[in-house]
Amino acid sequence: MTPQDASGDSRWSDLDRPPLNAGALRHALVREGGLWSEVDVVQRTGSTNSDLVARAARGEAGQGAVLVAEEQSAGRGRLDRRWTAPPRSGLFFSVLLRPVEVPVQRWGWLPLLTGVAVATGLSRAAGVDTALKWPNDLLVTVGGEERKAGGILAERAGDDGVVIGVGVNVTLRQDELPVPAAGSLALAGAVSTDRDPLLRAVLRSLEDWYGRWRAAGGDPAASGLQETYAAGCATLGREVRAELPGDRSVVGEAVAVDGDGRLVIATGPGVQEPVGAGDIVHVRPA
């Protein structure tokens, strides 16, 4: 009998995109004293972020819960943008963190921390050079062109929790890209597109960085996070346009990421403006 997913389609219909092995992932990631407390893999859902926020609200998920979907029908990015991809073509997952040891004002570093962790894990496991676009896009190079292959979305979960969602295009082909500016690890020449080791590498990297950050009380400098993020941030040194709330925009050179995780833009001689939220457009190459 052929395994079927919830839609009735064969789970094995695309042999280039085998399903994740939930049991093996749990065995590799859930351990005594570790961060990850449970790993659930579902065939299809609307949004892993929405599901995990709801589970946390019902008291059904604790720190270290990981929810992975083979397919998302209503995946969300920043600014309520939709994130769509074929089944089993990427990594679509959310994690629940409760950084109670860290002052709330430093929680804004969590999306940036996740970006560092994802980029580090994928560079090691997929052999692809990755870069970060402030605040939370993962960039790869395809045919000499910079393209977005992933994104991160953080949402509060009650008073003491944060759910962080990650979406990464792994095996998307050129004709499957949602927009021409998108990319995937496969198109960037990844040495491996096996999602099981890729997900393990990303979650282990996230556990490592989260542990360092918590041990430093969320201090981005003491934990090494601020320096590492800046080193891998493709936005710094670029001419950028920041589209801000209220239909305001700021144009200038991105010169730093400050201690609050904000992008500092030099708009003129001696004039710098920190940007905490907004859509960043890279106006010219570095």
Image (cartoon, helix red, strand yellow):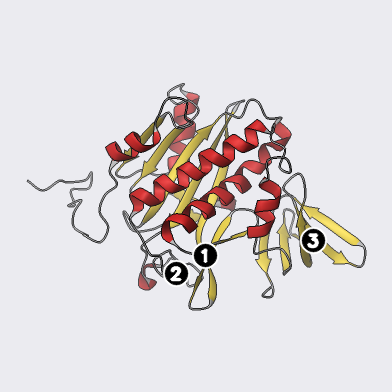
- Mark closer to the observer (1, 3): 1
- Kind of residue at disc 2: Ala
First-in-chain label (1 vs 3): 1
* Residue sitting at the far top: 59
- Disc 3 target residue: 265
Marks 2 and 1, how far apart at CA: 8 Å
- Mark closer to the observer (2, 1): 1
Give the crowd class for mark 1: few <14, some 14-19, many >=20 residues within 10 Å.
some
Give the crowd class for mark 3: few <14, some 14-19, many >=20 residues within 10 Å.
many
Give the crowd class for mark 2: few <14, some 14-19, many >=20 residues within 10 Å.
many
Marks 1 and 3, how far apart at CA: 26 Å
First-in-chain label (2 vs 1): 1
Q: Position of residue 227 (x, y in %)?
A: 70, 51
Query: In this rendering, would 236 be left or right of 185?
Result: right
- Kind of residue at disc 1: Asp
Query: What residue is at 63 percent from the left and 25 percent from the top?
Result: 100
The answer to whether marks 1 and 3 mark residues whose Cβ atoms lie closer than 8 Å is no
Q: Nearer the viewer, residue 180 or 147?
A: 147
Query: What residue is at 66 percent from the left and 43 percent from the top?
Result: 109
- Kind of residue at disc 3: Ile
Query: In this rendering, would 69 be left or right of 224?
Result: left
- Disc 2 target residue: 188
**223 vs 244: above or below:** above
Q: Position of residue 64 (x, y in %)?
A: 48, 31
The answer to whether residue 227 of the structure is visible from this angle is yes
Q: Position of residue 74 (x, y in %)?
A: 42, 49
- Disc 1 target residue: 129
- Mark closer to the observer (3, 2): 2
Query: In this rendering, would 236 be left or right of 136?
Result: right
The answer to whether marks 2 and 1 mark residues whose Cβ atoms lie closer than 8 Å is yes
Give the number of the disc on residue 14. Answer: none
Identify the image quadrant of the C terminus. Answer: bottom right
